[in-house]
């Protein structure tokens, strides 16, 4: 409830909808979430008056979540509220980052549309992704605004030992090749 408007941005609207649908299903079916946060799913009767679609849903406690594709549309304003949180998840793809023009278009959209659309006092952005090119926006954003940056292997250790041991990572590197491994994991 601390975030009245959350925008989830994927590389395309279709990708955002895929993740967005997963979030909706979790709210509808995850007993642990219901135990901690209560039932946030609107009743079938109230769904006529509140959004519960694959691009916008409103929880019982008034939180609005909106899905968007990267580089598309203008800012978001729902019930006279700006987003307090925008999550940009894997918005850059291989094809986009190869083109200076497309990288610049994404940068301009981020700084001229997304950042100004944030709530003035509480708005923040979380970018999640992989550094797939030396000039990706996520790296520039990190360098300018800070954040958390991890490689799969740091100081000779796996950063997520429970999921990927060093042996697991070596096997992945062998399967996909050094270049792809360095791009996706390092």
Image (cartoon, helix red, strand yellow):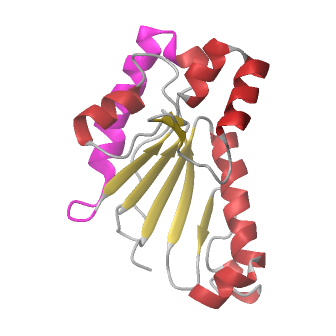
Q: How many marks?
A: 0
State the residue at coordinates (48%, 26%): 131
State the residue at coordinates (70%, 41%): 14
Q: Judge whether 35 appears above or below 30 on screen.
A: below
Q: Which residues are magenta?
A: 97-122
How far from the left and from the top, in percent, is residue 169? 68, 33
Using the image as rendered, state which of residue 66 and residue 138 is in the foreground: 138
Using the image as rendered, state which of residue 185 and residue 41 is in the foreground: 185
Quadrant position of residue 93:
top right
Can you see residue 54?
Answer: no
State the residue at coordinates (68%, 41%): 15
Q: Judge whether 60 appears above or below 156 on screen.
A: below
State the residue at coordinates (44%, 35%): 155
How far from the left and from the top, in percent, is residue 98? 52, 10
Q: Main SS of the magenta segment?
A: helix
Q: Judge whether 32 appears above or below 54 on screen.
A: below
Quadrant position of residue 104:
top left
**Residue 18 as seen in the image, left or right of residue 132:** right
Using the image as rendered, state which of residue 48 and residue 179 is in the foreground: 179
Q: Is residue 105 magenta?
A: yes
How far from the left and from the top, in percent, is residue 137? 39, 27
**Residue 42 as seen in the image, left or right of residue 63:** right
Figure quadrant of the N terminus: bottom left
Q: Is residue 8 magenta?
A: no
**Residue 110 as seen in the image, left or right of residue 61:** left
How far from the left and from the top, in percent, is residue 11? 58, 35
Can you see residue 62?
Answer: yes
Q: Judge whether 154 appears above or below 102 on screen.
A: below
């Amino acid at each position: 409830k601390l975030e009245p408007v959350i925008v989830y941005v994927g590389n395309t609207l279709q990708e955002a909808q895929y993740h967005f649908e997963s979030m909706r299903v979790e709210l509808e079916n995850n007993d642990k979430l219901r135990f901690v946060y209560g039932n946030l799913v609107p009743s079938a009767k109230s769904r006529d008056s509140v959004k519960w679609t694959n691009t916008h849903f409103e929880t019982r406690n008034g939180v609005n979540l909106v899905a968007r594709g990267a580089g598309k549309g203008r800012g978001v304003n729902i019930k006279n509220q700006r987003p307090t949180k925008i999550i940009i998840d894997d918005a850059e793809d291989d094809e986009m980052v190869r083109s200076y023009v497309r990288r610049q278009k994404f940068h301009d959209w981020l700084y001229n549309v997304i950042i100004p659309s944030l709530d003035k006092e509480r708005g923040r952005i979380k970018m999640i992704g992989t550094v797939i090119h030396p000039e990706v926006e996520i790296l520039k954003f990190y360098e300018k605004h800070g954040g958390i940056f991890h490689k799969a292997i740091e100081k000779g250790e796996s950063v997520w030992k429970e999921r990927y041991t060093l042996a697991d990572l070596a096997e992945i590197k062998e399967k996909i090749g050094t270049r792809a491994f360095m791009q996706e994991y390092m």
